[in-house]
């Protein structure tokens, strides 16, 4: 796996675990931290995809890449749809504004 993507993914996974473990007033802050790290991960993933010599032209082609399968194996199931949605935006060459990321 690309080291930059892996590092961003690991941060996201750590924040996901922290978020799911909290049951207190701090949960909102932890959730915000998770959300922020998820979109940093997506930005790093986007840079990786756009830097490929042969950029996938369809969502299916992107999702079929070995590294994407590794990511899906590591991501908790509730995040698969979010990841796939972001992957589709990458394929469609749509970049979210910061406001869109947090709605």
Image: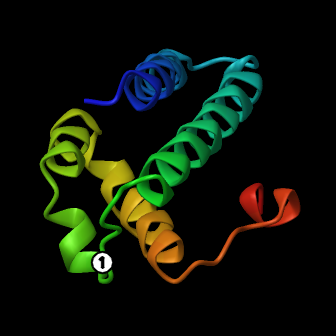
Q: Residue at x 54, y 38 (%)?
A: 41
Q: Is residue 23 left or right of residue 82?
A: right
Q: Residue at x 73, y 34 (%)?
A: 32
Q: Residue at x 63, y 37 (%)?
A: 40
Q: Nearer the viewer, residue 73 or 47?
A: 47
Q: Quadrant of the N terminus?
A: top left
Q: Nearer the viewer, residue 63 or 11?
A: 63
The correct choice, above or below, for 50 with respect to 95 in the image is above
Q: Is residue 38 left or right of residue 32?
A: left
Q: Give residue 47's position: percent from left, percent from top.
A: 55, 49
Q: Give residue 48's position: percent from left, percent from top.
A: 45, 46
Q: Nearer the viewer, residue 89 or 21?
A: 89
Q: Which residue is mark 1?
A: 59
The correct choice, above or below, for 38 with respect to 1 in the image is below
Write down the quadrant of residue 74 in the picture.
Answer: top left
Q: Is residue 22 left or right of residue 102?
A: left
Q: Give residue 10's position: percent from left, percent from top.
A: 41, 20
Q: Residue at x 50, y 65 (%)?
A: 86
């Amino acid at each position: 796996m690309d080291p930059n993507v892996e590092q961003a993914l690991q941060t996201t996974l750590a924040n996901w675990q922290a978020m799911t473990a909290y049951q207190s007033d701090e949960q909102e802050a932890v959730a915000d931290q998770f959300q922020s790290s998820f979109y940093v991960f997506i930005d790093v993933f986007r840079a990786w995809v756009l830097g490929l010599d042969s950029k996938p032209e369809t969502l299916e082609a992107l999702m079929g890449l070995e590294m994407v399968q590794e990511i899906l194996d590591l991501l908790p199931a509730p995040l698969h749809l979010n990841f796939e949605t972001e992957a589709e935006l990458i394929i469609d060459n749509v970049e979210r504004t910061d406001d869109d990321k947090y709605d």
